[in-house]
Image: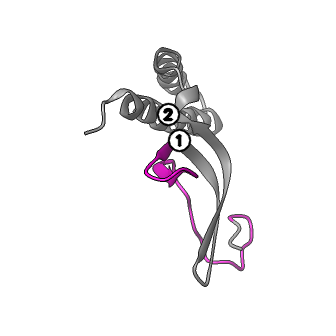
Amino acid sequence: MISPRDSSSPRVQLRSDLRRAPAYQANEEELFASYGGLIEVSDNHVRLLLDEADHARDLVESEIAEALVAAREMKAKATDQTELAEAQRLIDRHAVRLEVAKIRRKPRG
């Protein structure tokens, strides 16, 4: 397993991303917004250990948009690197969540 805190392991940084995971029923997909975590690759298996994962059906676009605005304001008012990093983390997280919410409401075709 690769750990970001293990200095002997190669550095791997997982970023927020959109992933479509196969559902248990045939011909269906489930959409998740994921953020942070670890990845383990062995033989023909990939295991994701995520810090956060939100199912698309649980995302409320208007609330996420408000949180994104607040995070951008937080970044503008940051007074040190710690505040700046935290604000950027929130911006990244909410941007991914908002994109997943928008994808969910688009008709598939």
Q: Is residue 41 left or right of residue 6?
A: left
Of labels 1 and 2, earlier in sequence is 1
Instruction: Establish if 79 lies above or below 21.
Output: above
- In front of the other: 9 or 33: 33
Q: Position of residue 46 (x, y in %)?
A: 60, 70
Residue type pointed to by label 1: Ala
* Circle number at residue 33: 1
Instruction: Establish if 78 lies above or below 15.
Output: above
Prevailing SS of the magenta stretch: loop
Instruction: Establish if 36 lies above or below 13.
Output: above
Decide if residue 81 is in sight here: no
Decide if residue 47 is in sight here: yes
User: Does residue 76 show up magenta in the picture?
Assistant: no
Q: Is the Cβ of the residue at disc 1 closer than 8 Å to that at disc 2?
A: yes
Element type where label 1 sits in the image: strand
User: Which residue is pictured at 53% across the width and 16% down the height?
Assistant: 63
Element type where label 2 sits in the image: helix
Mark 2 is surrounded, within 10 Å at the Cα level, by few (under 14), some (14 to 19) or many (20 or more) other residues, namely many
Q: Position of residue 101 (x, y in %)?
A: 44, 29
Q: CA distance from mark 1 to mark 2?
A: 6 Å
Q: Position of residue 68 (x, y in %)?
A: 48, 24
User: Does residue 28 show up magenta in the picture?
Assistant: yes
Where are the magenta residues, as a range? 4-32
Return the residue at label 2.
97
Q: Is residue 82 left or right of residue 23?
A: right
Residue type pointed to by label 2: Arg
Mark 1 is surrounded, within 10 Å at the Cα level, by few (under 14), some (14 to 19) or many (20 or more) other residues, namely many
